[in-house]
Image: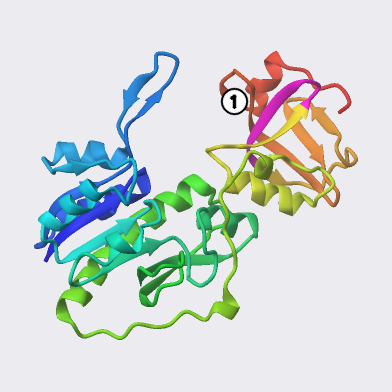
Amino acid sequence: MKIIFMGTPDFAVPSLRILIESKHEVLAVVTAPDKERGRGLKISFPPVKEFAVENNLPVLQPEKLKDEQFINSLKNFNADLFVVVAFRILPKEVFTIPPKGSFNLHGSLLPRYRGAAPIQWALINGEKETGLTTFALDEKVDTGNIFLQEKIKIEDEDDFGSLHDKMSLLGAKLVLRTVELIESGSFELKKQDGSLASPAPKITKETGKIEWNKSAKEIHNLVRALSPHPGAYFYFGNKQIKIYKTKIDNSVSPGTGKIMQIKNQLFAGCGNGTLEILELQQEGKKRLNADEFLRGFRFDTY
């Protein structure tokens, strides 16, 4: 089939790769506009664009998805199908263009965790399992009828980085299976049960602020969900400190909100239980393990 692929971040790259390497033809890629990044404000390409350029694919980067010129460009490709992975919310004028429709890959077992950050919220909530869903696009976000789903176990040592990478690879296989299912014409779409829906809103700065009166387990899961980025954080005096790795260790009891240093180890008292802080970062400094961090930083009573 002739496909137009839409996506922006690293998560979408394996899906684009598997389609390029398949028997299907990727006609073009639609991604976000380039951004200025860093102190020198150098132009930075989205990861999907970088991969598309390496593979000599035409790239469209519309500012507005309802732009008439953009919509006409899409129509002129005469694609059979649009495949969407980690992109913006498509207007009806766009997702209804191809005769075989448009489908999206979502990082949860829909209708659970509808929204922008399904992987993070599954970790925040301490889930032991999550998954991926391909579904036909509809006007309401993440509500379309389901093609396929695939479960994945969340390991105790998983953080956002590791789970994201595993899910992006598994998702790519699910994308290809969905394309082949649509090509065959022999499939039944499954309607989502809205009563089972749960939200996965965008991660904000406030989401990452550690509240020490919560349990050690809750804070541990927050740290996992926001590692390696953007990082869960707290303030020591006027310094912001991000935490990237912890483990629950109730062998010591510093007291709620207290930071205790024992030799080269660092412990934080929570509302229920204690966390050992294994990796952290002072604002403007490098990410370090606790031993390295304590060589240049001293915690007094917090």
Residue 226 falls within the magenta-colored stretch: no
In depth, the one of 3 and 69 nearer the eye is 69
Q: Secondary structure at mark 1?
A: strand
Q: Residues within 10 Å of mark 1 (few under 14, many from 20)?
A: some
On the image, the x and y values in percent for residue 207 come to 66, 45
206 lies left or right of 92: right
On the image, the x and y values in percent for residue 179 come to 21, 69
Q: Which residue is mark 1?
A: 288
Q: Which residues are magenta?
A: 236-246
Residue 240 falls within the magenta-colored stretch: yes
Quadrant into which the N terminus falls: bottom left
User: Measured along the vertical axis of the image, is residue 28 above or below residue 260?
Assistant: below
Q: Which residue is rendered at x = 40% and y = 49% of the image? A: 165
225 lies left or right of 31: right
Q: Which colour scheme appears in the figure? A: rainbow
Whether residue 33 appears in this view of the structure is yes
User: Measured along the vertical axis of the image, is residue 141 above or below residue 41?
Assistant: below
- Which picture quadrant has residue 124? bottom right
In depth, the one of 223 and 121 nearer the eye is 121
Whether residue 152 appears in this view of the structure is no
Quadrant into which the C terminus falls: top right
Q: Which residue is rendered at x = 47% and y = 79% of the image? A: 192
User: Measured along the vertical axis of the image, is residue 70 above or below residue 144?
Assistant: above
In depth, the one of 187 and 88 nearer the eye is 88
User: Measured along the vertical axis of the image, is residue 190 above or below residue 9?
Assistant: below
In depth, the one of 11 and 7 nearer the eye is 7
The dominant secondary structure in magenta is strand
